[in-house]
Image (cartoon, coloured by chain):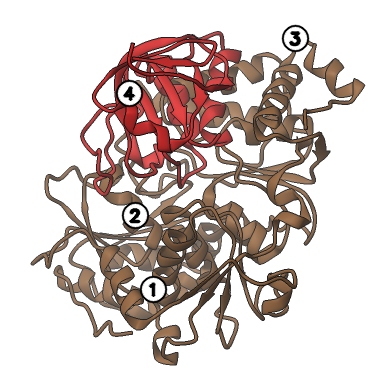
Amino acid sequence: MRCDHRAQVLVAGSGGRGPALILTEPISFWGGVDPSNGNIVDVRHPQCGLSVAGRVLFLPGTIGSSSASAVLLELAHNGNAPAALVLHEPDAILLLGLIVAREMGWETPVALKLDRALFPAFADTLVKASRDGRLTW
Amino acid sequence: MSLALTAEERAIAAGSDGAAMAMRIVAESARLLGAPRLIPIASAHIDGALYHGDSGTLFAERLVELGATVAVRATLNVGALDLLGCSHVRLAEPKREMARRMMDAYRHLGCETSWTCAPYQAGHRPAQGSDVAWGESNAVVFCNSVLGARTNRYGDFLDIACAIVARAPDYGLHRAENRRATIVFDVSGLSQAFMQSETAWPVLGSLFGRSVGNGIGVIQGVKEHPGEDALKAFGAAAASSGAVGLFHIAGVTPEAANLEAALGGRSPEESIIVTPAMANDARGRLSTADRPDHIDAVAIGSPHLSLAEFAALERGIAGRHLSVPLYACTGRHVVAELDRDGRRKALESAGVVIVADTCVVVTPILSELVGGVLMTNSGKFAHYAPGNTGYDVIYGSLTDCVESAVAGRPVIADADT
């Protein structure tokens, strides 16, 4: 194990393992991520064309529409959610998607808080996010 | 500071009905936001009735099954269908049925069937200083900035949950101390000719959103009130390019009698001096199509067109026929007025497609085209159309949009700032 961080749990959920996807710019989930498959479709976003499904998704920031939660709820419903979410700062609009998914009785990935300065340490790795907030690879 | 719920709130959350589910969603969000308590709200604007997938329909129907109803006035933002039948939405079954079920569920929850992203121009104008729970980014920014009512950027689900329990987390823009500007956005170096042009406010909105991110800025150097439709366009563009929930304009908006008032008597943390080159660059960034030789369609009305904006459209068309469709998105509050005077029929025979209850970037209305080019005067459409419709965008004024729709190719007047 070359990297081991203890992150704050923002929303409880299942732990998960997946390839790291580190976004280099903030993203709007609504309009930026296809709710049917998790593909990043914002043509102005540097990671356009990649998919968030099954990835440990590192978010330096989030912008734009107040429908971000709906996109994340849909991804949780259709099985295309990230394996875990790692946010530089809590975004209540986005994370609400996880809170509602839990109310509906659907499985949800854990959401963690980690300073974005630590994101590059996870580049090109297979990350394990545990439900208690440990991030390792 | 941890969240403290009242005994009544805890009792509601412990139940098994729709209000219980709503209270738990509001309380969990409050915890996430670091809010110390919940506060009463006067109204809500619900963005949750737009179909993004089956999950949202199932959520709304769960609330209906559990007997929930809204406890405050709640208007509805756009849905995925044009229920008036003005335009043809290409949403196919089974999605179409799920979208209809979703719109029905929100009606059953007691929401008003306003179906507009401009509720503030459809008679829903909360009082200055009142706390409300509004969703949809342009509605939020208008409510805070132009009306001076207090709301955070409520997402889908939280907006309806707040409306059901008539409470919201005491956090963020509900608190007076968080409404102060910390960034000055000085436009006094831009020419009066530019400031009075049709594209000034959406272009500046786009630049403002990208410049301030989720900060609060005050615009300095505006000599006269630009009108509500200009502020609507500014806020929508700003809330698309950045996470803007509130802006001030010194001498114009209600919490900014002057620059000092907007800044709360403190010095700004940052000052942005906007140059003509910056405005030109911001305008350029709104287009993704590189000098196209044709356009396939024009779309206007994000946010939904007001009656005054329809009057400007009619003046621009001036009895001519359009050679590509011009989609004009609006709410049923405006369609009713257009119908009353026979104006809708005249617009439609000129080639305008009126889109009611929804809009062209949230549901499939534009023809399915590979490499299509869409022209718009909306900073918000320019931002979202490429991702949501697959069309490239070319940005211009309303005059340019109409002239281009007549010609079938881009006709752009001199755009110098």
Tell which of B393 and B351 is nearer to you: B393
For the residues beneath circles 1 and 4, the answer to whether they share a chain is yes
Query: Dot 3: what SS?
Result: loop
For marks 3 and 4, the one nearer the N-term is 3
- CB atoms at circles 2 and 4 under 8 Å apart? no
The residue under label 1 is B313
Q: Residue at x 53, y 55 (%)?
A: B244
Q: In the image, is B77 to the left or to the right of B397?
A: right
Tell me the distance, in whole angstroms, between the alpha carbons under discs 1 and 4. Answer: 34 Å
The residue under label 4 is B93
Residue type for callout 3: Ser
Q: Is residue B330 above or below residue B183?
A: above
How crowded is the residue under tag 3: few (<14 C-alpha within 10 Å), some, or many (20+)? few
Which corner quadrant holds the C terminus of chain B? bottom left
Q: Is residue A44 above or below residue B273?
A: above
For marks 1 and 4, the one nearer the N-term is 4
Query: Dot 4: what SS?
Result: loop
For marks 1 and 3, the one nearer the N-term is 3
Residue type for callout 4: Glu
The residue under label 2 is B383
- CB atoms at circles 3 and 4 under 8 Å apart? no
Name the residue at the right extreme: B7
- CB atoms at circles 3 and 2 under 8 Å apart? no
Chain holding disc 1:
B
User: In the image, which lettered chain appears brown?
Assistant: B
What color is chain A drawn in?
red
How crowded is the residue under tag 1: few (<14 C-alpha within 10 Å), some, or many (20+)? many
The residue under label 3 is B16
Name the residue at the front extreme: A2
Q: Nearer the viewer, mark 1 or mark 2?
A: 2
Residue type for callout 1: Leu
